[in-house]
Image (tube, grey):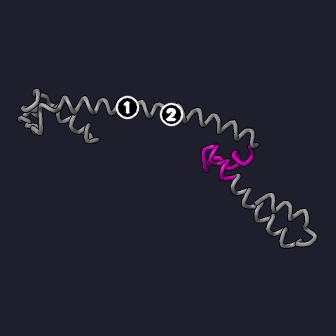
Amino acid sequence: MADELVERLLDWPYQGETMAHEAADRIEQLTAERERLALTICGGEDAPGYANAQTVETLEHVAKQNQQYHGATINSLRAAEVERDRLREALTRLLAPFGNDACHYDHHGYCQEHFIEADCCVAHARAALKGETP
């Protein structure tokens, strides 16, 4: 699209005013697209003046740094999910002998059904598996 527009502009004596408006509109679109991309690379709305002032080379450098950082972040996220899933599986197996036995607390607040604890480990584990706070 840009190449065609440039070719027509070079032949502008034949289409003058229409071409000038079309070129100006396209320049505005490209400027807005550059600003959007620069903001995305630089971290968003908090950096509009900074992002717009950067050269393409600088933005490319920032993008490469972001890619390295986010790659490491994704690797950490994957490792955390693997560990979490392994722990959930182990906790589920650990709770299997207790079935659906409900906690029964005495007048001191100790669970009489599971190991006589105030903070029943079975209730705590069940809550953790559900993503709840005991």
Judge by depth and name the residue closer to the eye, 65 or 103: 65
Q: CA distance from mark 2 to mark 1?
A: 14 Å
Report whether 51 appears left or right of 5.
left
Report whether 23 appears left or right of 67.
right
Q: Position of residue 86 (x, y in %)?
A: 31, 30
Residue, disc 2: 73
**Based on the displayed image, in which of its 4 quarters is residue 24 positioned?**
bottom right
> What amino acid type is highlighted by mark number 1?
Val
Q: Is residue 132 above or below residue 17?
A: above
* Residue at the spot 50% in from the left edge and 34% down from the top edge: 73
N-term mark: 2 or 1: 2
* Residue at the spot 75% in from the left edge and 46% down from the top edge: 53
Q: Look at the numbered disc 2 and give the secondary structure of its residue.
A: helix
* Residue numbers of the magenta segment: 35-54
Report whether 55 appears left or right of 87.
right
* Residue at the spot 81% in from the left edge and 61% down from the top edge: 4
**Based on the displayed image, in which of its 4 quarters is residue 131 positioned?**
top left
Report the mark closest to the observer, 2 or 1: 1
Q: Is residue 93 above or below residue 100?
A: above
Q: Look at the numbered disc 1 and give the secondary structure of its residue.
A: helix
Judge by depth and name the residue closer to the eye, 134 or 1: 1
Decide: few, some or many residues near mark 2? Use Cα within 10 Å; few <14, some 14-19, many ≥20: few
Confirm whether the magenta stretch covers residue 41. yes
- Which numbered tag is attached to residue 82? 1
Which secondary structure dominates the residues rendered in magenta?
Answer: helix
